[in-house]
Amino acid sequence: MPSFTVERLSFETLTELPNSWQPQDYKALLVKTGYDTPEEIAASELKDMALMGLTDLEPTESAQLVLEYLFEDQLTTGQIENLAHQMLTEKLWEENPELDQHEGFFKATQLLYTAYNGKFPRAEAVQFQVKLTATDADALAVFDTAPEAPLLRLLAQGMPDNTLLKRLFHEQLDGTSFPEAPAIIWQLTPLQREDTAVVFDVVSSAYWLDDFKYADSYEATTQADSVPAAPEE
C-alpha cells in the first residue's frame, strides 16, 4: 500500500467556485431572462447585467431559471420547481441526496446569493493546496487514473475521527471502491510533479473538507480504486 507524507500548504474559504461562471453562461442566462442581444454587452459587464436580469424576477423564478440552465438534462420541470423553492432556505449543495449535483447547486446558490443580496443561503467552499511525497516514485501511479478516491483516503487521515467524511464514507475510505469521490472533490488540479512528489490544488464543499484546515504534516497510506475487469467477448 503506497505511503505518503501529506503536507497542507495552504487553506482558504471561498464563497464562489473558481471559474464556475463564464461569459457564455452569463449570455445564456440573459437570453433566458428575455435579453435579446447579449453578444453586444462588454465582457466586463456581463455578470452585472445577468444579475440585474435575475433580480427583475421573483427569487423563486430566478432560481428556477438558473436550475433549468444548469440541470436541463438531469431534472424534470416538476423537480426544478420544487428545488427552486427549497433553495431559498436549504443548502442543497449539502442536503440534496444526489451528490453529483452538489457542485451545480453550489454554483446556482452562489449566483443567486449575490444577485439577491443574501436572500439565499450563503455558500461556502474550501480551496487548498496539498503536497504528497511518496517513499518511491512508483507510488505516484496511484493518482494516474481517478485520483479523487486515493486523494480523499489520504486527506481523511489528517482529519478528526468524527469528521463527516469518515462517518458517512468509512467503508469507501477503507476499501477500493469510492464512486462518490469525484462528486466530493469538485475541482482537482495538479500544480507540480516531481520524481516522488505531487502538489494538488483542491476545491470542495466546506461540508466535506473544512476539517482539513487543522491538518499539518502527517504520514498516511492510500490505495486506488479497483477497476472491474472488462467482460470477456
Image (spheres, grey):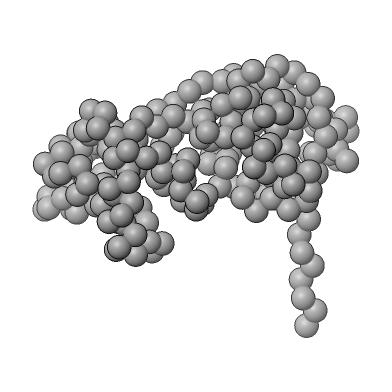
Residue 103: x and y, percent?
46, 44
Residue 3: x and y, percent?
85, 33
> Which residue is rendered at x = 82% and y = 25% of the image?
219
> Which residue is rendered at x = 47% and y = 40% of the image?
94
> Which residue is rendered at x = 34% and y = 59% of the image?
79
Q: Is residue 74 above or below residue 181?
A: below
Judge whether residue 121 can be spotted in this image: yes
Residue 34: x and y, percent?
12, 52
Residue 15: x and y, percent?
40, 28
Is residue 148 rendered to the left or right of residue 56? right
> Which residue is rendered at x = 78% and y = 43% of the image?
174
Q: Is residue 31 above or below residue 116?
A: below
Depth check, front residue: 41 or 145: 145
Depth check, front residue: 110 or 17: 110
In the picture, the quarter occupied by the C terminus is: bottom right
Dividing the picture into quadrants, the one containing residue 221 is top right
Dividing the picture into quadrants, the one containing residue 227 is bottom right
Depth check, front residue: 103 or 163: 163
In the picture, the quarter occupied by the N terminus is: top right
Q: How many tags in the picture?
A: 0
Dividing the picture into quadrants, the one containing residue 215 is top right
Judge whether residue 137 can be spotted in this image: no
Is residue 69 rendered to the left or right of residue 178? left
Q: Is residue 48 above or below residue 160?
A: below
Q: What is the residue that sits farthest to the bottom in this orientation? A: 233
